[in-house]
Image (cartoon, helix red, strand yellow):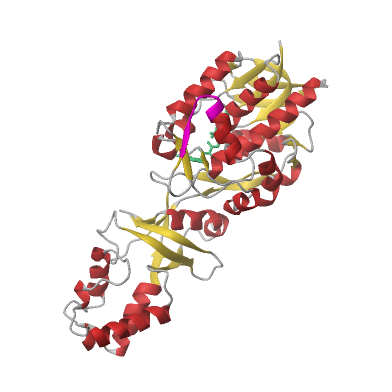
Amino acid sequence: MIYDLIVIGGGAAGFFGAIRSAERNPQIKILILEKSNEVLSKVRVSGGGRCNVTHACFDPSEMVTNFPRGNKELRGPFHRFLCGDMMDWLSAHRVETKIEEDGRVFPRSDTSESIIKCFVDLCRQYQIEIKTRCGVSSIEAKEGHWNLETSVETFVCRNVLVASGSSPAIWKLCKGLGHRIIDPVPSLFTFKIKDPLIDGLAGISVPYAEVVIKGQKFHETGPLLITHWGLSGPSILKLSAWAARALHEINYQFSIQVNWTGEDRETVFQEIQRLRQIHGKRTLLNHVLYKIPKRLWQRMIHILKLDTSIFADLKSAQMDALVKMICQCEFNVTGKSTFKDEFVTCGGIDTKEINFKSMESKLLPGLYFAGEILNIDAVTGGFNFQAAWTTAYLAADAITQSLDL
Ligand SMILES: Cc1cc2nc3c(=O)[nH]c(=O)nc-3n(C[C@H](O)[C@H](O)[C@H](O)COP(=O)(O)OP(=O)(O)OC[C@H]3O[C@@H](n4cnc5c(N)ncnc54)[C@H](O)[C@@H]3O)c2cc1C
């Protein structure tokens, strides 16, 4: 049997690519090969089991600003299939979605099982074959076809969609076929920090902080969360994505400065001066500045040895130290942690070798790529899945078009 399309990888991009191909042409023979014993396993655990399926961003130019890698390449593809299109597609297949306050989109059911059921049902409907425990170990072009060797048997097809995520073995096979692989390194991780200021304060978050990596050009803003092992939250995850390669090069040993309020030094200084004048008798311990959580504020005051001080007593050096603690609080980061966090890989197939109109290899006709296997990744918020949907959609359109000829 010669398949029209074999998809390597039963993940988000693989399933969507297979289903979209079948929707375009229900006659074509499609097979999904999945190495593990379960398909769509990342979709299942994504978004804490709720699957943050995309983001409410409807402008391609704005969308690409969330991609540290792949932003130029994805501009065209997002013009063809963006978040609203995915939401419409899901709705047309009876998976209603909802937009949360921060723009993240989830199935209305609040469970990733809705997406999984939708995909699996559609595969059944279109008679897309799925073989699990069937990892591809070799990809070979032979006499106008592709031979895919697995532990079970060798499969033959006209087109291959490689959607194996961040699989080192498949990257190696692609390298063997002539593709350049950009060194994979982790993205979307939290910072390991041991510091008396945050020790024991796990769970406390500030709604808006500015975080700067010292000695580097990277800085981010957004909510910040204190964890058992250091700092996390959207501002840290975004920073880790933009600085993924730079931080890997310095072995995740670096310093950061946190501004807990987003206000500049001068404004905070003036505010403390104002309090000295109008509320001079108030104790610092009981007068929290801005929206700094009370326990964190009291820890700051304690570390600065101001527990019994009132605003009127503040000396100039003490004011400077307080302003520094609020606006330029320094921490040494000693490593990264991915515990319970969404993480993706930065690196993969060099995007220069891919035609972003069709997702076809520029080196090998009939070989297509979608999803995380590419050197494309985004910050958190549903953007990584949207990249998988969009690239798979484009690949499916090009594959079915080539089969129609
Ligand atoms: C815990 C966690 C939570 C996440 N949550 C979100 C979220 O809420 N929103 C979001 O946008 N992104 C999220 N992400 C990122 C998102 O899951 C990925 O960007 C997305 O799954 C990439 O899809 P993919 O199809 O390219 O790869 P994958 O989903 O990784 O699928 C690749 C598949 O290929 C298979 N495979 C590998 N090698 C072979 C082989 N040799 N032969 C056959 N099959 C093979 C793998 O077993 C796997 O099933 C999360 C990631 C993690 C780890």
Residue 254 place in picture, x, y as percent: 46, 65
Is 92 one of the magenta-colored residues?
yes
**257 left or right, relative to 183:** left
x%, y% of residue 333?
A: 41, 62
Nearest the viewer among 327 and 83 is 83
Q: What is the x, y in percent for residue 86?
A: 58, 35
Look at the image and tell me whether residue 31 can be seen: yes
- Name the quarter where the N terminus is drawn: top right
Residue sitting at the far top: 1
Which residue lies at the image location 32% right of the left edge and 70% below the top edge?
290
* In the image, residue 193 above or below residue 352: below
Relative vertical location of residue 278 with respect to residue 381 in this rendering, above or below: below
Q: Residue at x 27, y 61 (%)?
A: 199
**Can residue 11 be seen at all in this image of the molecule?**
no
Quadrant in which residue 107 is drawn: top left
Residue at 23 percent across and 64 percent down: it is 295
Q: Is 100 left, or right, of 288 in this rendering?
A: right
Q: Which residues are magenta?
A: 91-98
- Point 60% across, 49% down: residue: 63
Quarter of image, res 277? bottom left
Q: Is residue 193 above or below residue 69?
A: below
Image quadrant occupied by the C terminus: top right
Judge from the rendering whether residue 128 lies leftward or rightward of residue 208; answer left or right: right
Judging depth in this view, the residue of 256 and 311 nearest the camera is 311
